[in-house]
């Protein structure tokens, strides 16, 4: 499933410094197509829609986790700055 592959790409990016550096080299406003291409080179099969869905789910889970420990207000503000959607 493409969304699962996109989640795996996000997790790998967090864990792998080399992949994280490649993503960072794309720049702050990298087009989704470039991230999808980088994911494909790393062995992940997903499209831009799946990546967007996985990203939203990842941020929602982070927000929920922060809510559980009382720090959701700061995370909500960060999420708002990170995405216009």
Image: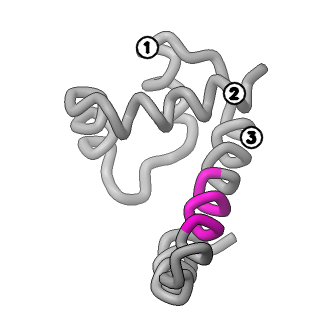
Going from N to C along the chain, the mark reached first, 3 or 1, is 1
Q: Is 12 in front, or is 52? A: 12
Residue appearing at x 50%, y 78% in the figure: 75
Please count the marks in the image.
3
**How far apart are labels 1 and 2 at the CA level?**
17 Å
Q: Is residue 61 magenta?
A: yes
Q: Which mark is residue 12?
A: none
Tell us which disc is closer to us: 3 or 2: 2
Picture coordinates of residue 81 (x, y %)? Answer: 49, 79
Residue appearing at x 63%, y 16% in the figure: 45
Q: Secondary structure at mark 3?
A: helix
Residue appearing at x 72%, y 32% in the figure: 3
Give the main secondary structure, helix, strand or loop, of the magenta stretch: helix
**How far apart are labels 3 and 1 at the CA level?**
18 Å
Q: Which residue is mark 3?
A: 49
Q: Which residue is mark 2?
A: 4
Q: Is residue 47 left or right of residue 67?
A: right
Instruction: Kindly check if marks 1 and 2 are in contact, taking CB atoms under 8 A apart as contact.
Output: no
Q: Secondary structure at mark 2?
A: helix
**How far apart are labels 3 and 2 at the CA level?**
12 Å
Q: Is residue 63 above or below residue 10?
A: below
Going from N to C along the chain, the mark reached first, 3 or 2, is 2
Going from N to C along the chain, the mark reached first, 1 or 2, is 2
- For the record, the magenta segment spans 58-65
Q: Which residue is mark 1?
A: 41
Tell us which disc is closer to us: 1 or 2: 2
């Amino acid at each position: 499933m493409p969304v699962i592959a996109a989640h795996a790409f996000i997790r790998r990016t967090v864990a792998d410094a080399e992949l994280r550096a490649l993503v960072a080299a794309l720049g702050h406003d990298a087009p989704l197509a470039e991230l999808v291409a980088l994911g494909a080179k790393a062995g992940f099969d997903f499209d831009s829609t799946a990546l967007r869905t996985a990203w939203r789910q990842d941020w929602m889970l982070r927000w929920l986790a922060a809510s559980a420990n009382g720090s959701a207000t700061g995370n909500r503000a960060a999420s708002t700055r990170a995405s216009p959607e």
